[in-house]
Image (cartoon, rainbow, N blue to C red):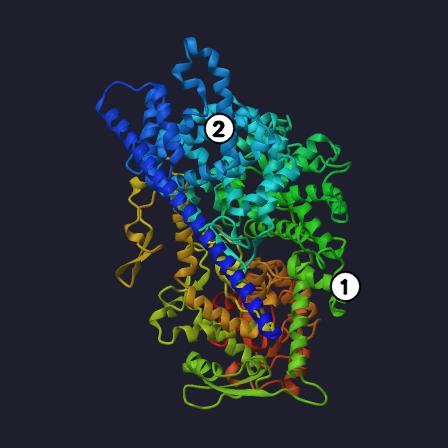
Amino acid sequence: MFTVSQTSRAWFIDRARQAREERLVQKERERAAVEIQAHVRSFLCRRRLQREIRREIDEFFKADDVESSKRSALCIFKIARKLLFLFRIKEDNERFEKLCRCILSSMDAENEPKPEILQDSRLITLYLTMLVTFTDTSTWKILRGKGESLRPAMNHICANIMGHLNQHGFYPVLQMLLTRGLARPRPCLSKSTLTATFSLALRPVIAAQFSDSLLRPFLIHIMSVPALVTHLSTVTPERLTVLESHDMLRKFITFLRNEDRCRDVCESLEGCHTLCLMGNLLQLGSLSPKVLEEETDGFVSLLTQMLCYCQKYVSQKKSNLTHWHPVLGWFSQSVDYGLNESMPLITKQLQFLWGVPLIRIFFSDILNKKLLENQEPAHAQPASPQNVLPVKNLLKRAFQKSASVRNILRPVGGKRVDSVEVQKVCNICVLYQTSLTTLTQIRLQILTGLTYLDDLLPKLWAFICELGPHGGLKLFSECLNNDTEESKQLLAMLTLFCDCSRHLVTILDDIEVYEEQISFKLEELVTISSFLNSFVFKMIWDGIVENAKGDTLELFHSVHGWLMVLYERDCRRRFAPEDHWLRKDLKPSVLFQELDKDRRRAQLILQYVPHVVPHKNRVLLFRNMVTKEKEKLGLVETSSASPHVTHITIRRSRMLEDGYEQLRQLSQHAMKGVIRVKFVNDLGVDEAGIDQDGVFKEFLEEIIKRVFDPALNLFKTTSGDERLYPSPTSYIHENYLQLFEFVGKMLGKAVYEGIVVDVPFASFFLSQLLGHHHSVFYSSVDELPSLDSEFYKNLTSIKRYEGDIADLGLTLSYDEDVMGQLVCHELTPGGKTTPVTNANKISYIHLMAHFRMHTQIKNQTAALISGFRSIIKPEWIRMFSTPELQRLISGDNAEIDLEDLKKHTVYYGGFHGSHRVIIWLWDILASDFTPDERAMFLKFVTSCSRPPLLGFAYLKPPFSIRCVEVSDDQDTGDTLGSVLRGFFTIRKREPGGRLPTSSTCFNLLKLPNYSRKSVLREKLRYAVSMNTGFELS
């Protein structure tokens, strides 16, 4: 019983719980149904209300379109409230547009923008009009007259609108609109649209009284729009007038001159847009010169900071982290390629930095100073024509006192380096030097702009000369050892001066440098080169260059580059006195000792400024280098080993062909080693004699004589001085490039063995042999006179032509007569159809010079240089200038030192230094022969008219004189009888009818034992003038 009762109770309770839960669920369902029904009724009600409101709005706008009368502001206000209450952009965009038009119609606003070109969007124009209207009450007609009392409240509403816009990304939206409308080949913003957009951007700044909080976004988002100021000046110049009326440039300068604020702006923009901001500021500056004059320091400071920010990301080479920028080069920040179409305009804006107006403002303190001149009357003679002006007259002109000599040539000192004036000039120089290292792709434009004013660089040099207590070298030498900001600025000034001066002198031709003396007087170039020479030497010798990096290394390359441009100009045509380039405090013996110890500074001296070492010492060094290499390669005879000898057989009738075939296949080691030559005569019989270098010397001289004969057409002579260079038409020879390589090897072998050969090369060709043409400072035009002086005059006359050069009918091409046929060479692709104009005439001159001296003979020159360098290492000859290399090849061009020749002469056949005939010979050479005849005598004996560079002690084989009794074909050499007869002046028979002869391969003069001095003089002069040699006795 008990169990059943309990079970029934449990069941009843469970049943009651279930019933309660079902009632709760039912009640929840009813509540949910009621709520859902309420939401649905609410939704349907709202939709119905929205439809009714939209219908009412549509009827309002429809009636507005039909009626010509304007609706009242109150009606529009009621409709606007209803539309804004339910506004959805997708459904109500068109209604909102109509509302805006109604509002503007009711406001009757003035100067509202209207779409003027097809590209303008109607909506953009409309919305801009709304924003223009409701951010400024000045155009509201409703506020005029009786409504004037409402203006303060309305102004407050407009300010609130502007504040709301600024908080919701107003400036970024305007930046996007301006950039998309202007950063394209043809801007698509009309005058009204651009005016409205810029006015909207400026209004919050003016309303906030130019607070920093609004100047910052204005600079970042508006002033960084590519070429904005350019477009404003073209499309709507009155907007620039507004900027000027509010003195905005001064406010920008004041804001950005603060280092932290400027860095913040640059970091917000990144490099590409920083350049855009900089370009706009520069153009604004060019339009407000008075502001710049007053705010020069601040403007220079902010430009420098911007450039320094960009410079951090400028890279010297391509990498995975860099991008190409058309102005900055390889850049390690992201590049906005959307700006590429605006880059020409941005570059044009940046050009204001190195334009004449800004340079005059920045360097006003320097340019306003007058360069004092001596008041003594001039005594200088009129300048001679360029090609006949003697060096002596040049030097005389350079150092005599005349009206053209300035009193600024020597460093005088006296100006404190911490003065305001000096600091200002230093800051300006830092700005331009930073621009040169940052704007890498327009570096030449910057240099050209800085050198446009003829008096800037001389006055900057005068300013440098006045710095410090003593001026000049001492001050800058001290700066090298100081790591202060002041020292860095002074060195930046020197770097800028050197870069600009080097660029200027590189682009000036000889007439402009020597005759017209543009910018620098010759006296100043002498002083400057002395300063540069000492400065570079000190940097190397004091060990500064060894560990140099960054700005110090850049300074060294700038100073050294300017120095070498002057040195090479002086090598071509002298302006400096004798021994000007030598360092008296550098003893060659000390330098050689340091080289033996592998001291770095000694190696750098030879690498960068070898000209400070006397030429003969460098030649000795060159010979020592060759000797050391021979020893290293085992090419020198020792007690334990003999060098490998290469034997070749040469037919005299086919000397060039046989020499080419047998030597061109030799290895580099064999070519540098001992080569023995055996000649075969026309009958096929070996010629008697043993080659102890003499026969090889004869073979080498004959080979060189034949290959350089212009009749062979491998080489050609220049007009005028008849110097040799590769013939442009040498390609008619089969295997002509292999022939040039062979010629290079033969020439290299002659230099390697110290055999002087009388081969006068054109200066421009020697420059290429030295590798100067690869230098960025090399100018083809400067070398052109060494090829064709008349052609050079004609080209430079084009440069000075004052009329329209197009009238001459020239094109970018060169017509050449090649074996009776006229061949047209295009200097650039499509050059024969491209006319030469005033804009491209300078390019035409350089292209023409480069074509004549390089392009035409590029392959021949490369082949010859390849052969030459297989024997002579390039670093060996880089310590010589162009004329010095010619002397290394062909001997000294100084007069023959008879005492030196007499001292190193060897006598045979009974002759000796006190022999009567020998005494007569030296007396005739000294007293009776002219310098030209002495040169002919030397050529008669040695085949070269010039003495060896280091004197006759280095002539191999040594100069020899032998007494002969019979003709060459009967001469069997010295015998005891012949030697005794010669020694005691005993004649076998009178030799009066015989001429002196020579063996050039042994540098041997064969001299009969004449009885009278007059006979010796007559016969020797005849033999020398006829150059008989072996041929006639």
Residue designated by label 1: 589
Q: Nearer the viewer, residue 674 or 773?
A: 773
Q: Residue at x 40, y 57 (%)?
A: 852
**Amino acid type at image mark 1:** Ser
What is the secondary structure assignment of the residue under circle 1? helix
Q: Which x, y percent locates residue 730?
A: 37, 68
Q: Residue furthest front?
A: 1
For discs 2 and 1, the disc positioned in front in the rendered view: 2
Q: Nearer the viewer, residue 910 or 367?
A: 367
Q: Nearer the viewer, residue 421 or 455?
A: 421
Q: Residue at x 57, y 67 (%)?
A: 9
**Amino acid type at image mark 2:** Ile
Q: Which x, y percent locates residue 538?
A: 73, 52
For residue 161, the mark is: 2
Q: Residue at x 64, y 31 (%)?
A: 297
Q: With 1032 as the anchor, is 754 left or right in this view?
A: right
